[in-house]
Image: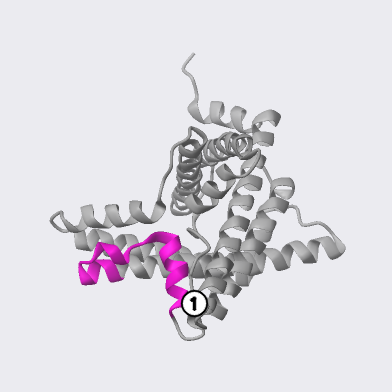
Amino acid sequence: MTPNPKRAARDVSQSRVFRGVARSGFAVNGLIHVLIGAIAIGVAVGGARGAGGSGGSGGGEADQSGALKQLAATPGGLFVLWAAVVGLFALGVWQLVQAVVVSDPDAKKKWGRRASEAGKGVVYLAIGVTALVFALGGSSNSSDSSKTLSANLLSTPGGVFLLVALGLAVLGGGIGFVVIGVRRTFRKQIRVPAGTAGRAVTVLGMVGYIAKGIALAVVGILFVVAALTADPQKASGLDGALKALASLPFGIVVLVAVGFGLIAYGVYLGARARLAKL
């Protein structure tokens, strides 16, 4: 009997254990975003002190690598890192499975949803790989990786167009996050509780998605700037994007607001771990 990949994927996705482990991926991703938001606020406070003459900037790297580095340095951090690896890989695989089993009578919508689910899966797996590096005692720097990718693209024929396309794609993703937050369409992904709890989850989701979208949009803009100026140093990932906000007029206030927004997004993801429709 010829195996049916779609049926096999559906059977895997319906496993209670698999779904339980995948849910933990949301919680882990939430913790990472809470740490990124806290680091961003630390960067803003350090920048404000520096501007006032009391010295220093600081706060660390406001991205996944910085958050995981902080986890690795805390008591019990290694256990949390390994839990993060398992949860993120499970969530990534679950998203890829959803890309296989998705169905829609409209072919364009079906393939659009498949691309979206697969993209999410790749992102979770990439964060999982970074967590694995730290769990094994290594280190990683997302900002350096972004600069290296940009430099490699700029050194190839037509690479500037690819870098612009990448920047526009990330910018589009950021705008998408903002739209999801404003329209509250994230509520379709969860079982919204009744009463005060439901309102709280909705507010956290709105604020979180908008803040995450702003951060991603700035990352995309920096990739485009790097391409147009042929300077890969401008493409510095999420950490560079958040620190770029601090250099704008009223940037410290904006960065603090985005930092709290990312914390809200992290808390929302923690709630989603329990409420997600898996």
Q: Is residue 172 magenta?
A: no
The total of numbered circles placed on residues is 1
**Where does the image place residue 45, in percent across and percent down from the top left?**
57, 73
- The residue under label 1 is which amino acid type? Gly
Residue that appears at 74% across and 61% down: 201
Residue that appears at 60% across and 28% down: 12
Residue that appears at 63% across and 47% down: 26
Classify 246 as above or below 148: below
**Where does the image place residue 93, in percent across and percent down from the top left?**
52, 36
**Where does the image place residue 120, in percent across and percent down from the top left?**
50, 48
Viewer-side residue, 107 vs 208 = 208
Identify the secondary structure beneath mark 1. helix
Colouring scheme, one of rainbow, by chain, secondary structure, one colour:
one colour
Circle 1 residue:
50
Residue that appears at 61% across and 62% down: 38
Residue furthest left as drawn: 157
**Main secondary-structure element of the magenta-colored stretch:** helix
- Residue range in magenta is 225-247
Q: Quadrant of the C terminus?
A: top right
**Residue 19 sits in quarter:** top right
For residue 79, say whether it is visible: yes
**Residue 37 sits in quarter:** bottom right
Residue furthest right as drawn: 195
Pointer 1: residues within 10 angstroms few (<14), some, or many (20+)?
some
Classify 231 as above or below 15: below
Viewer-side residue, 246 vs 265 = 246
